[in-house]
Image (cartoon, coloured by chain):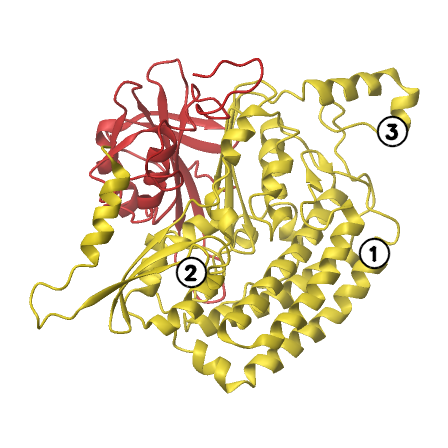
Chain colours: A yellow, B red
Amino acid sequence: MKQPLEDHVATIAALQEPPASPSAPRRMTLNMGPQHPSTHGVLRIVIELEGETIKKADPDIGFLHTGIEKQCEAINWAQAVTLTDRVDYLSNLANNLVYALTVEKLLQLEIPPKAQWMRVMLCEIDRLNSHLVWLGTHALDIGAMSMFFYCFREREEVLRLKEMFSGQRMMTSYIRPGGLALEPPRGWAQAVGKFIRQFPGRVDEYENLLDNNPIWKIRTQGVGFISIEDMLDLGVTGPMIRAAGIPLDVRKTEPYSSYEKFDFTIPTRTENDVYSRYRVRLEEMRQSARIVVQALEGMPEGPWQADAPHVVLPDREKMKTQMEALIYHFKIVTEGYRVPAGEVFQAVESPRGEIAYYAVSDGTSKPYRLHMRTPSFGNLQALPALLEGTLIADSIASLGSMDFVLGDTDR
Amino acid sequence: MSFPANVSLNHAAIVETKEALGETTLMADASRIVDFCRYLKDEQKFNRLCSITAVDWHPAEPRFEVVYHLHAVEPAPTGSTPAVRRLRVKCRVSGTNPEIDSVTGVWRAANWYERETFDMFGITFRGHPDLKRILMPLDWEGYPLRKDYPTHGYKYSYKGEEAK
């Protein structure tokens, strides 16, 4: 491509030109972002306006591109799990899980039930974290300021739980190929139980605060419509598509990590507007709390790591007494474990939609290729379809209802 | 993961069918990819495109594999779980002047995925409505996910490595 930047500038300049005939409506080009607070990160949208109606919306992404897929090819399979945390800062455990499942599929590892249940429990707690941040910031965008404080109060408790398990509040890397990173800490069941038993009451509180607020209803009901056909064609997943009436959820359609053993429902709505997306996420929080309670009550006994000494780091105590454990430790830390050649695809349901990793191994200890199909990238593609033809004042509500994370989009 | 093993696919573009780790991969003829994708969408009901990406097998020839992940979501009555199927389609593309036809006419979702693949691998998608870089800056040189592209880029070099 010749001088692409100049071409781009020329395109923008052409958009600013006055209309051909005086009677034709005058169009204005509005640059939104990349620093606009309601874009929740660095998303730039070039919007063309006729009066207050959006005629064209052109999202411009890539400001947060960090080359995670490329970096994964330079480090070994065991190290790459730390990069998967950094894809989506609001649902790092879902990213850890999909990576772990991908590598385990290649290695054909059997994961003990306790680790699987623990993973389900932690991912659902993380879903609460993500939905809480979404609800707080989305309400803040629309003007319901106090929601932010209520949601972040509970989010703080979730972060404390994550810290209790892994020592980290956000980038936990707690789910790893072969099981979990550390043994669950003493007293985890009480801490999780205390949080989760009072949580449904908190969700009722949010519902009361917003549903009895007429401004919230006016700003969200009937706003941000996008047809089901458009959604399927554009690859939209997650609460967006469930708010349109399609119960598409990887946890139910292709259960992983023992999700088939839990009793929960997939909330759907049919209105397909910003309000229904809010209702779907609110209901999902209740369902996640149900799953966590079930996981707490039925947590199986047994090991929390797979019996695979060539993949899982040995116990410190064993390293001091057994030569084999020391050799395995040395091998895993220096060279990494080798993964048989092949290619796999694994999808899980992140709070934003379907997250899928496609891994190719050439038989060495480094990933040959790791492609991340992230839900934000897939959903954001529907942004023009969502915004075009609507009013500029509604664009903030529509944008917020998509719940994208720009790190997840740009990787 | 429910990759279909029982779907009988019959199309002239299929070069090879592979089954590994419970997943089905179809190797397809790159020159007939649009026809084939249309057949998969219209007759085999793969109504959702999950992603498009590529794998660089440098220095082998044909160098690139363009990988399509498809998803069939069957309509289900309210309250029940829809049945889904997945399928992987791969096409080999030459390293000299890598080109393949765009499938944006079949699934609109292909638009950004093809732009991303073009951005990262330099594979041109013929007939794409707006093929330009999506993640890297518009004036970026080189294609970052190619195997002959250094992890730290061309612009900088570290101790012990020569700048290119």
Residue A242 visible in the current orientation: no
Q: Amino acid at mark 2?
A: Ala
The number of discs equals 3
Residue at the (34%, 49%) spot, across then down:
B47
SS at circle 1? helix
Where is B30 relative to B160, above or below? below
The residue that mark 1 highlights is A189
Q: Position of residue A66 (x, y in %)?
A: 51, 38
Q: Nearer the viewer, mark 2 or mark 3?
A: 3
Spatial distance from mark 3 to mark 1, Cα to Cα? 24 Å
Q: Dot 1, how many residues are within 10 Å of its Cα: few (below 14), some (14-19), or many (20+)? A: some
The residue that mark 2 highlights is B76
**Are both tags, 1 and 2, on one chain?**
no
The foreground one among A316 and B47 is A316
Q: Amino acid at mark 3?
A: Arg
SS at circle 2? loop
Write down the chain letter for disc 1. A
Q: Nearer the viewer, mark 3 or mark 1?
A: 3
Where is A380 relative to A301, above or below? below
Q: Which mark is residue A319?
A: none
Where is B32 relative to A160, above or below? above
Spatial distance from mark 1 to mark 2, Cα to Cα? 38 Å
Spatial distance from mark 2 to mark 3, Cα to Cα? 51 Å
Classify the position of the N terminus of chain A by image quarter: top left
Q: Dot 2, how many residues are within 10 Å of its Cα: few (below 14), some (14-19), or many (20+)? A: few
Cβ–Cβ under 8 Å for marks 1 and 2: no
Q: Position of residue A353 (x, y in %)?
A: 50, 54
The foreground one among A116 and A350 is A350
Cβ–Cβ under 8 Å for marks 3 and 1: no
Q: Earlier in the sequence, mark 3 or mark 1?
A: 1
Q: Position of residue A404 (x, y in %)?
A: 49, 56
The residue that mark 3 highlights is A316
